[in-house]
Amino acid sequence: MSFSADWLALREPFDRQARHPGVLERAVAALSGRSAVTIVDLACGTGSTLRALGPHLPMRQTWRLFDNDLSLLARVPPAANLYVQPLDLVTDLEAALDGPVDLVTTSALLDLVSGDWLERLVTEVAARRLPVYASLSYDGRVELAPADPRDAAVISAVNTHHRRDKGFGPALGPMAARSAGAYFEKVGYAVEPGAADWVLRETDRAIQEAMLAGWAVAASESGEMPAEAVAQWLVNRRAAVVANRSCIRVGHLDLFAAPAAARRADRSQSNSTSSSSR
Ligand SMILES: C[S@@+](CC[C@H](N)C(=O)[O-])C[C@H]1O[C@@H](n2cnc3c(N)ncnc32)[C@H](O)[C@@H]1O
């Protein structure tokens, strides 16, 4: 499945605003006290996680960015200590994790992957005792205003469609983030989840138009609704967008997961730092 650079650019500001600050803070805290870190970003696209997390890290950073889409990788702005590498996460996940790594990140990936692949990811990072910051997994919750009687049927069809194979096997879709939490807990990780919803306001017309058009295609392809009903829904919803009356909330989940012992050590380190600085 391919993602256009235009779509990733359109969503990036909303992703950045949606990221759960507490979950991001846990990822930052996990690296505190180090003078240099290496971060592996899986399915990096054009590098949005680097841009979102990098400025929060005070230490020297080396980033290794992986994706299988060369046209997206070509748009990652070059920088010192930034290594961009084409790699298929289906066949070569383990290679991406090899070598010295302090944190694994990914964003908007987990809802595309299968349960088997997710379990493999968890097994591989747990074998290396690596912390993981996995942000912006779509979780199936959508609120649309003003309401249309077809909204629930369309979103249900979209969520069914989301579970189609995106190259990793049947996708977890909206279940991904919760499944990831459960898998991580099974291997002894402590998991910190947080809601990271997109809030699209009346004036956010371009992203609303793109979302609605994509949802209409997915709902039609799902076969759960007559194409005519989907088309009428789209006409109605687009009219609300054009009239500056449409608001959309799209549910996402962020999570930070780390080996439980490491998390306890983090906490006591930050407690002793804050008590000694009082
Ligand atoms: C929704 S985009 C998210 C991109 C980026 N993380 C972001 O948040 O902007 C999903 C990304 O997964 C990548 N991807 C999909 N299948 C992949 C695979 N088998 N191996 C590596 N990357 C893959 C796509 O090329 C795309 O960049």
Image: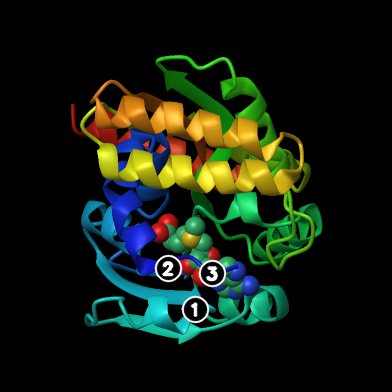
Q: Position of residue 259 (x, y in %)?
A: 62, 49
- Residue behind mark 1: 69
| Residue 275 vs residue 125, the one in the foreground | 125
- Residue behind mark 3: 2
Which amino acid, mark 3? Ser
| Ligand 1 within 8 angstroms of badge 2 C-beta | yes
Which amino acid, mark 2? Gly
Q: Position of residue 32 (x, y in %)?
A: 33, 52
| Ligand 1 within 8 angstroms of badge 3 C-beta | yes
Seen in the picture, residue 107 relative to 247 is either above or below; the reply is below
Q: Do labels 1 and 2 touch, CB within 8 Å?
A: yes
Seen in the picture, residue 202 relative to 217 is either above or below; the reply is above
Counting every numbered tag in the picture gives 3
| Ligand 1 within 8 angstroms of badge 1 C-beta | yes
Q: Residues within 10 Å of mark 3 (few under 14, many from 20)?
A: few
Q: Is residue 127 visible?
A: yes
- Residue behind mark 2: 45
Question: Which residue is at a point 66% across and 40% down the rendered structure image?
Answer: 227
Label 3 residue SS: loop
